[in-house]
Each structure stands twice: as C-alpha cells, then as structure tokens.
Image (tube, grey):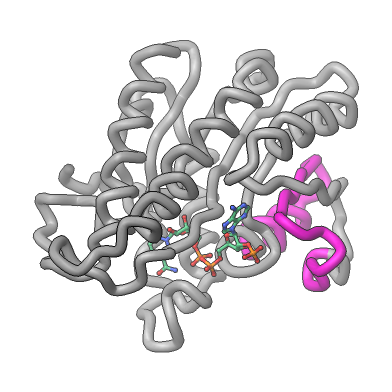
Amino acid sequence: MSTTTWLITGTSRGLGYEFIRQLVEDPTTIVFATCRTPAKADKLHALKPKGKLHIVQLDQEDKASVDAAAKEVEKLLEGKGLDYLLNSAAAQYGGNDTALSLDSQQFMDTIKNCVLGPALINQAFIGLVAKSNKKVIMNMTSGLASIALDCGPKNASYSIAKTALNMYNYKLAKERPDIIAFVMDPGWVKTDMGGPGAMLEPEFSIGNMLKTIKAATEKDTGSFKRYNGEPIPW
Ligand SMILES: NC(=O)c1ccc[n+]([C@@H]2O[C@H](COP(=O)([O-])OP(=O)(O)OC[C@H]3O[C@@H](n4cnc5c(N)ncnc54)[C@H](OP(=O)(O)O)[C@@H]3O)[C@@H](O)[C@H]2O)c1
C-alpha cells in the first residue's frame, strides 16, 4: 500500500480542519495537522483517523515556530518526503477596510500573516517537498485577490495581501520548476472567516479542492484555480 504524506496549516478550525477531516478518512495517508495551539485544538483531537494523524504546533507569524515544526515533521517522516504542502492558514486583520481607511498596523499584520507566513513555511519545508513523489505546494488565496474579477473597494488589506501571495507563488514556481506550486480560491465558504451567509459548505469546497489538488501535474504550476479546478483570471 503506497502512502501519501500531507501537511496542512491552520487546522484548528475552518477549511484547514475540513482538509484534515477528509484526509484522515483515507488509510493510505500520513497527515500533519498544524495549528497555533494544539492543546486547544479539540476538534482535531476528537478525530478518529483511519490514516496516521500527527498534530504539530506551527504559528506562521513566528519563524522559530515554523522552523521547529519543520524539524519535528522531518523526524516523524522517517526519511520520507512531503507529497502535499497546503498553506490554508490566514487571518484577515484589516476586516472590511478600504484603500483610504486601512490601518497601518493591521495592514502590516495582514501582510506578515498572509504573505510572509506561507513564504517562511515553504522555505522551511521545501527540502521535504522536493524529496517526495508528488512535490505539490498549494498556497490558499482568494477570489478577492483577482483584479480581473473586479470585487470593488472592500477588504483592502486582505485582498492586497492575497494578490501579493499570488505573485509570491509565481516567483516560487519560476524558481523551482521541479515543484508544482499553485494558488487556489476555495470559493465563499461558511467558516469563521466566510461567515454564516457564505454560499458553500466546507465539505463541498474542500472535497472539490482535494480532487483538484490530487490531479495536479507539472502543467498546473504557477496557476490560479477555483476549488473545482477552473482557472481564475488574474
Ligand atoms: N472562508 C472563505 O469564504 C474563504 C474565501 C476565500 C479564501 N479563503 C482562504 O481560505 C483559508 C482558510 O480560511 P478559513 O475560512 O478556514 O478561515 P478561518 O475559519 O478564519 O480559519 C483560519 C485558520 O487559520 C489559522 N491561523 C490564522 N493565523 C495563523 C497563524 N499565524 N499561524 C497558524 N495558523 C493561523 C487559524 O488558527 P487559530 O484557530 O489559532 O486562530 C484558523 O485555524 C485562508 O487562507 C483564507 O484566506 C477563505
């Protein structure tokens, strides 16, 4: 039985948790669920995994925490690589701000979380991804990052940060053609971030995302995709 290895960030709740919930149903998976505070991740601890589940502390705003997580995961992998690295964690510190109302601290915090966070994680884990069979990195973006979709003035800091993440992914894909690195929009989903009025259920969005991610090949590197694999205009 060939196993696949997965690491997901931000798994205490929301879409990160839903990735884990679905992945551990598969007995051929070895899954690393990372979160800021494992002791408080009650939903993760309540799972009954059919595959292997490791819960690992990782705060993407803290480089020491990211580097320590990479060391811990490398040990637990016992010589294996990391097939899929999914950067799902994000925080929307600026809320519904605009270009003219944004707060400088919230803006910087959002950039640190949404752009520098995944960058530090990819730096720390690139060696493990490169030695795997699949070599896939998915950086979770948002439809709000698309200029072509013309989403208007709302959520400025967050949208700017996710657009920067898209450019970060472009740079990553160009620097490492041996890796399959792309950005995905999960759709508008019912989580703490998406709110109760969102259109999609986490189960539907993540079920479709996993199908798309598992089907990824070299031709997908550098792309911007919706949860169902459709291309999104930049
Ligand atoms: N939901 C939507 O409609 C929607 C739409 C477009 C894009 N997205 C994107 O999808 C991803 C997941 O969003 P979501 O809806 O699941 O959000 P969520 O419900 O607000 O959950 C966010 C998750 O990220 C974690 N997180 C935040 N900052 C972190 C940090 N510094 N280090 C580690 N973990 C951190 C949170 O951990 P704590 O529990 O410790 O706070 C939580 O687990 C994000 O990248 C988001 O931008 C969501």
Query: In which quadrant is the C terminus drawn?
Result: top left
> Residue 115, position in %: x, y?
42, 41
Query: In which quadrant is the N terminus drawn?
Result: top right
Please say whether residue 62 is one of the residues in the magenta stretch.
no
Q: Residue at x 48, y 12 (%)?
A: 178
| Outermost residue to the bottom | 197
Q: Residue at x 35, y 31 (%)?
A: 168
Q: Residue at x 49, y 69 (%)?
A: 204
> Residue 49, position in %: x, y?
86, 58
Q: Is residue 43 above or below residue 104?
A: below
Please state which of residues 223 and 124 is positioned toward the viewer in this rendering: 124
Which picture quadrant has residue 187? Answer: bottom left
Taking the image as shown, residue 215 lies to the left or right of residue 229, namely right
Please state which of residues 86 and 102 is positioned toward the viewer in this rendering: 102
Range of residues picked out in magenta: 18-44
Which picture quadrant has residue 133? Answer: top right
> Residue 61, position in %: x, y?
58, 45
| Outermost residue to the front | 104
Q: Residue at x 29, y 74 (%)?
A: 96
Please state which of residues 60 and 88 is positioned toward the viewer in this rendering: 60
Q: Is residue 161 above or below residue 84?
A: below
> Residue 210, position in %: x, y?
54, 50
Taking the image as shown, residue 83 lies to the left or right of residue 224, namely right
